């Protein structure tokens, strides 16, 4: 979500800075466009940082019946691929 919104803000800023050819007395659209482009690029980079820092985990759970005693035995394994063992 952050990456897509950052790209969207960057594109809107580029349109304001480069594609519009009219002036408004109370605001400088070029400056607003440059600010939005900077904010969009920063948001994109933050989104990439968040995406690469996430840890994914997987867990496996299995239940078996012990034939000798008739009781159930549950085994759970958790794995974090980004962790070093």
Image (tube, rainbow, N blue to C red):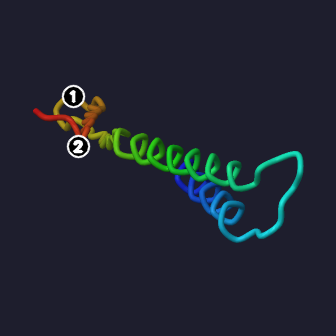
Mark 1 secondary-structure assignment = loop
- In the picture of the structure, the residue carrying the numbered disc 1 is 69
Q: Residues within 10 Å of mark 2 (few under 14, many from 20)?
A: few
- The answer to which of marks 1 and 2 sits earlier in the sequence is 1
Q: Residue 5: x percent and y percent?
A: 62, 53
- Tell me where residue 53 sits by quadrant: top left
User: In the image, what residue occupies the spot 48% across and 45% down?
Assistant: 47
Left or right of 29? Residue 2 is left
Query: Residue at position x 30%, y 42% from top?
Result: 62
Q: Quadrant of residue 57?
A: top left
Q: Position of residue 17 (x, y in %)?
A: 67, 61
Which mark is on residue 81?
2
Position of 46 with respect to 14 (left or right) is: left
Which is more foreground, mark 1 or mark 2? 2
Left or right placement of residue 37 versus residue 51 in this view: right
Where 60 sits versus 8, above or below? above
Residue 55 spot, x, y in % from top left: 34, 39
Q: Taking 83 as reference, is 17 left or right? A: right
> Residue at horizontal 83%, vertical 66%?
22
- Quadrant where the C terminus lies? top left
Q: Nearer the viewer, residue 68 or 14?
A: 14
* Residue 42 position within the rendered picture, expressed as x and y whole percent measured from the top left: 50, 44
Near mark 1 (Cα within 10 A), the count class, few <14, some 14-19 or many ≥20, is few
At horizontal 39% and vertical 42% (from top left) the residue drawn is: 49
């Amino acid at each position: 979500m952050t990456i897509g919104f950052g790209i969207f803000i960057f594109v809107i800023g580029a349109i304001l800075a480069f594609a519009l050819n009219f002036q408004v007395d109370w605001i400088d659209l070029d400056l607003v466009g440059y600010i939005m482009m900077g904010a969009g690029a920063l948001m994109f980079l933050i989104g990439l940082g968040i995406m690469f820092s996430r840890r994914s985990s997987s867990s496996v759970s299995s239940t078996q019946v012990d034939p000798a005693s008739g009781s159930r035995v549950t085994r759970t394994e958790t794995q974090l691929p980004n962790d070093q063992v």
